[in-house]
Amino acid sequence: MNLKLLNSSEVKDLATSQIFTLGNKLSTGKYNLNEIGEVIPSAVMVQDLTIPKVTYMNDWGCDVLDHSMDEINALGSDYYEKFFPGQAESLLNSMKGFFNRADQTETYSFFQQVKVCPKFNYNWFYTICKLLLENGREEKPTKLFLLSIPMSGMDPLVTKVNKILDDNEFVVKNYRKFALLTKREKEIITLLTEGRSSQEIADTLFISRHTVSTHRKNITNKLNVDSFAELLKFAIAFDLIR
């Protein structure tokens, strides 16, 4: 894929599809944080949502902030005000819907200014985050996986990540379709791949059969799939299989 032919919006779409795939690989144990953090030229982080607290940051991120992981943890909640002064509350408010939906298949992205070293000047970053399932299928995720990319470093990032993702091409090409799906539609796709009938899906989700039929039509239109085999391929690629 030639990034020189992509505009900035397409590059952001590509980066978003990449963090989706990386997050899934972390959740299933195919990759670990150090493997990802060592090769990506951006800040790779994990935050514990119950504290909140940064529990992991790669060396690249620590170097940019000129703080070790121990020093970042020692800051506690002051971490947010030190590096993102005046932004923490607004960012958290904007993410409330994302947190409340607790949809591990969803990503959320935003622009933010970060105080970086050596002079603690403000630099613009594009940050993408995804809820992280540490054990694969816990009921409600408590960790957030983040990739924070300097605006000047978007192209090098996606090039680097492409080299470590060997099965991401289908995800990249179809991510915009996936992003159109609602949480309910994703649930129905999962049940369809298990061979459930419309009536069985209706009984499982406590909705009417007519509602299931409407969702199935919307799924077909959004994904432009004509067969179960195509739907199954899509479900596998986007980790909608239980």
Image (tube, helix red, strand yellow):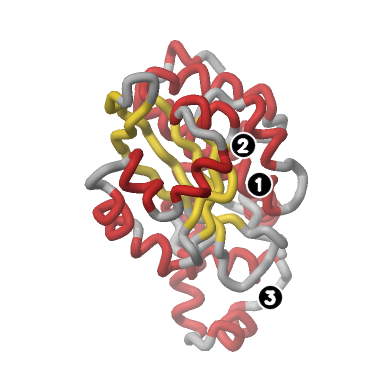
User: Considering the numbered disc 3 on the image, is that residue within a helix, a strand or a loop?
Assistant: loop
Image marks 1 and 2: residues in contact by CB distance under 8 Å: yes
**Mark 1 crowd level (few <14, some 14–19, many ≥20, 10 Å Cα):** some
Q: For mark 1, what is the residue?
A: 237
Q: Which of the two marks, 2 or 3, is nearer to us in this view?
A: 2
Q: Amino acid at mark 1?
A: Ala
SS class of the residue under badge 1? Answer: helix
**Image check: 30 left or right of 66?**
right
Q: Which residue is labeled 3 in the image?
A: 196
Q: Which residue is mark 2?
A: 170
Question: In 3D space, how far apart are the residues under numbered discs 1 and 2 (Cα atoms)?
Answer: 7 Å
Q: Nearer the viewer, mark 1 or mark 3?
A: 1
Neighbour tally class for label 2: few under 14, some 14-19, many 20 plus, Cα within 10 Å: few
Counting from the top left corner in percent of width and height, residue 11 is at 43, 26
| Badge 1 or badge 3: first in the primary sequence | 3
Q: Quadrant of the N terminus?
A: top right
Residue at the spot 40% in from the left edge and 60% down from the top edge = 98
Q: Quadrant of residue 203?
A: bottom right
What's the amino acid at mark 2? Answer: Phe
Residue 223 placement, left or right of 56? left
- For label 3, the crowd category at 10 Å Cα-Cα, with few meaning under 14, some 14 to 19 and many 20 or more, is some
Residue 131: image x %, image y %?
53, 56
> Disc number at residue 172?
none
Counting residues from the N terminus, which is met first, the one under dot 1 or under dot 2? 2
Residue appearing at x 52%, y 39% in the figure: 17
Residue type, numbered disc 3? Arg
Of 224 and 131, which appears nearest the observer? Answer: 131
Who's the residue at 56% across and 19% down the image? 159
72 or 21, nearer to the observer: 72
